[in-house]
Amino acid sequence: MRAIGNLLWFIFGGFLMGLAWWLFGILAFVTIIGIPWGKACFVIGQFTFLPFGREAISRKDLNQKDDIGTGLLGLLGNIIWFIFAGAWLAIGHIVSALACFITIIGIPFGIQHLKLAVLALAPIGKTIVTK
């Protein structure tokens, strides 16, 4: 079922939003100082291409301890991210979700877009794991 969901997702919207994540990743890498954000963009971009069967969780919840991305620096990184890229990616996922909600078959894809929109707002300190 995951394979079918991922295939349909990839064809009907996941591909474009995954490319959007990668575009922001390339732009972040060009700035040199944005390399940590760029790396996160490529990881989340891969997740966006095939999201079913995986989920984004906090590294603090996974490891039961704080690290550089889950503490105060992570909060600062997420604020900077939100200003320069997060809001735009979230808007893209929300628009895609609304387009998916038009049909009954698209509702699970719309829900996934909304989850990715929330992730787009604050991705620093998150990791992708298999369900």
Image (tube, rainbow, N blue to C red):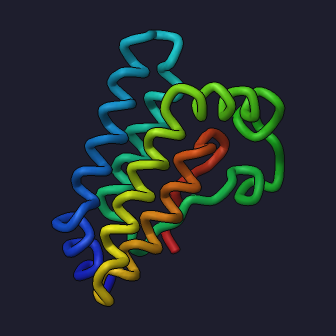
Q: Position of residue 9 (x, y in %)?
A: 26, 70
Relative vertical location of residue 45 with respect to residue 98 in this rendering, above or below:
above
Q: Position of residue 39 (x, y in %)?
A: 45, 32
Residue 120 placement, left or right of 92? right
Residue 127 placement, left or right of 63? left
Q: Residue at x 75, y 40 (%)?
A: 70
Q: Residue at x 83, y 48 (%)?
A: 65
Relative vertical location of residue 54 with respect to residue 48 in this rendering, above or below:
below
Relative vertical location of residue 57 with respect to residue 25 in this rendering, above or below:
below
> Looking at the rendering, which quadrant does residue 52 occupy?
bottom left
Residue 45 placement, left or right of 91? left
Residue 127 placement, left or right of 102? right
> Looking at the rendering, which quadrant does residue 125 occupy?
top right
Q: Residue at x 75, y 34 (%)?
A: 75
Q: How many marks?
A: 0
Q: Residue at x 34, y 61 (%)?
A: 96
Q: Position of residue 127 (x, y in %)?
A: 57, 51
Relative vertical location of residue 118 with respect to residue 130 in this rendering, above or below:
above
Q: Position of residue 46 (x, y in %)?
A: 34, 50
Q: In which quadrant of the rendered image does the N terminus lie?
A: bottom left
